[in-house]
Amino acid sequence: MLFILPLNIWSDSNIDGQTVTFTQFINEMAGCTRYTTFENVKIRYKMPDDKEGMDKRFNGGEPELYISQSIRLLNCDFDVDYWLVLRNITFNDYFAVANSTPLKAIFKECTFKKTLRFYNNNIDFIDLDSCKLEHGFKFFRNDVKDRLTFKNCSISVNPNLFGDTDALDMEPRLFRFANKQNGFDVDIADCVFDLPENLRNNPQFFLTLTESDFKNLSLTGNTFNCTVDLSESTVGNAFVTNECKYNGSLVLDAFNINPINTRVQWSTVANNRISIFDHKLQKTYNGNSVDSIGSEVRFASLISCYANFYNAFKSQGNRIAANSCYVEWKDIETRYLDRQYTSGVDKSIFFNYLMNVFLKTFCDYGTNPLKAIQIAFYVLLFFAGIYFFFPYSILSFHKRTMFDQLKIYGKYLSSPQTLLEIEDSVIAKENKTPTYDEYMSFVTESKGKVPWYFNLFGKPLYFLELIRNKPTKLFYKLIDIFPDEWETMSQTKKVIATVMYGMVFMLTVVWFFLIHVLDSVALSLNVFSTLGFGQIPIKGIPRYLTILEGFIGWFLLSIFSVSLISQVIQ
């Protein structure tokens, strides 16, 4: 009974060592009643059997076919000119192909309830289109001439099948790929890799593409609800990852790519998804776990992953992605320096940490010069707000203050003089250097007695001076309607004057408020940019604040200049 028992568990097929058509071969698999190995079978395309059978199935003319038993193809020999094309077939048990040649296979709309495996085969290509792999995929030590593609597939594992078999190398895996032979193309597009939440940190269920050689590796439009492990693999030509959703980590330590032909959509791999994996501790490390990374070796490995992509972006001229990658890289470095300093491992790195913090705050490590200008703008307004409440001697727009202007209106209402008379007397007092008026008087009195160019260069400036005062005088003519003094006005006139000059009073306050704001900003800008007027036109405590603002301005403008030059050079 001990010798007979294994024979009841598995058996050889009825066509071992024979030559059969594709249609016959598929029908033999569907007719198996136990775990069956097809060994040394030659599969050849034969007209008209396969034209009627296999082609009709592939073109959608046959109902769904169920293969209920576990199937293994061993040392099978396929037609060199025709492909194994399977469509709308459900494999309810394990399906494995080993040591077969030359395999050219297309699986479309097929479902694999248990693991799909390919071992030690000589393969031209394998395409899986719109297939469901419900308990993982394994691909080991195959010699591939062309490609392996997955399109619109869903790959997952079924926890209910754990422990279903104790056969060699049959532990459950999500996606296990290993190729150390000649590189070939692997294209995974619009697929969903799904794992239960409790399995996502288990390295046994990583999407594993490690220690392999690829000619081209393309990951586009996929959803990875798992960790993707590309560590110690090499892509000889083009590595592409676009429009993917990495909901787990992306392990990239010792991942070797061609910088010129690498196309990475940075936004999909950003936010600390780039990781390394410590096989000894069975733990993943990324930018979110810098505090526990500890080892200098692990830190260097993580940084090298960022440098890999950063160099690729720079070599392609993608400055935006390169800057974003560099900022995340430097954020990790800053947290690492902070951890090293606060834990007492290395106290000498404090100033390195402090410099990183400064550069992050003011210009995103030199990648964003406009950030320094933005902060400079806020600093300038802050100091301008302080100067607004303190007296200073600079008046950039008006020669008189708000209080002097209000005194003119008050004097008009309290005296018999007109506004124009009062304004002319005030203007006369404001002329600190009467030399120009004296010159114009001289020219007027000496008309015909001096050469013409004395008038040519003098009068235009004189007329401009008159024009400058005309708007003010015109405004005074409009509101100069109360020739009487306030005390002698009738009650009606007092009411009208109160309303009218109340409005004038408010307009004057608002106008001079805006002018005072402008003067404060001009003073702050002068101090911030360290232009200077030979002296600081402010007294008291704010005078010391101008020194502080000047230092901050020098610092921020220096950072802006260096950052801008760095970006221009890039």
Image (cartoon, rainbow, N blue to C red):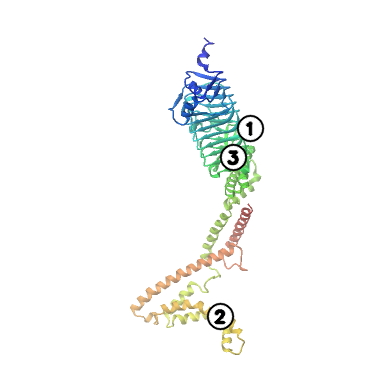
From the image, state whether disc 2 or disc 1 is nearer to you.
Answer: 1
Residue 307 visible to the viewer: no
Judging from the image, what secondary structure is the residue with disc 3 in? Answer: strand
Dot 2 or dot 1, earlier in sequence: 1
Which x, y percent locates residue 86?
A: 49, 28
Q: Name the amino acid, label 1.
A: Asn
Residue position marked by numbered label 1 in the rendering = 182
* Mark drawn on residue 400: none
Disc count in the image? 3
The residue under label 2 is which amino acid type?
Pro
Residue for badge 3: 239
Q: Is residue 388 visible?
A: yes
Q: Residues within 10 Å of mark 2 (few under 14, many from 20)?
A: few
Label 1 vs label 3, nearer the camera: 1
The one nearer the camera, 77 or 137, is 77
The answer to whether residue 104 is above or below residue 220 is: above
Q: Which of the two labelled residues, at mark 1 and mark 3, occupies the earlier sequence position? A: 1
Query: Residue 269: percent from the left, percent from the top?
Result: 55, 42
Q: Position of residue 185 (x, y in %)?
A: 59, 35
Residue under label 2, please give it: 460
Q: Nearer the viewer, residue 550 or 97?
A: 97
Furthest toward the bottom, the residue is 449
Q: Amino acid at mark 3?
A: Phe
> Crowding at label 1, few (<14), some or many (≥20) Cα neighbours within 10 Å?
few
Q: CA distance from mark 2 to mark 3?
A: 73 Å
- Secondary structure under tag 2 reads helix
In the rendered view, tell whether residue 211 sits above or below residue 303.
above
Q: Is residue 486 left or right of residue 123?
A: left
Is the residue under label 3 in contact with that under label 2 (CB below 8 Å)? no
- Give the percent coordinates (x, y) of residue 38: 54, 20
Please name which of the two marks, 2 or 3, marks the residue nearer to the observer.
3
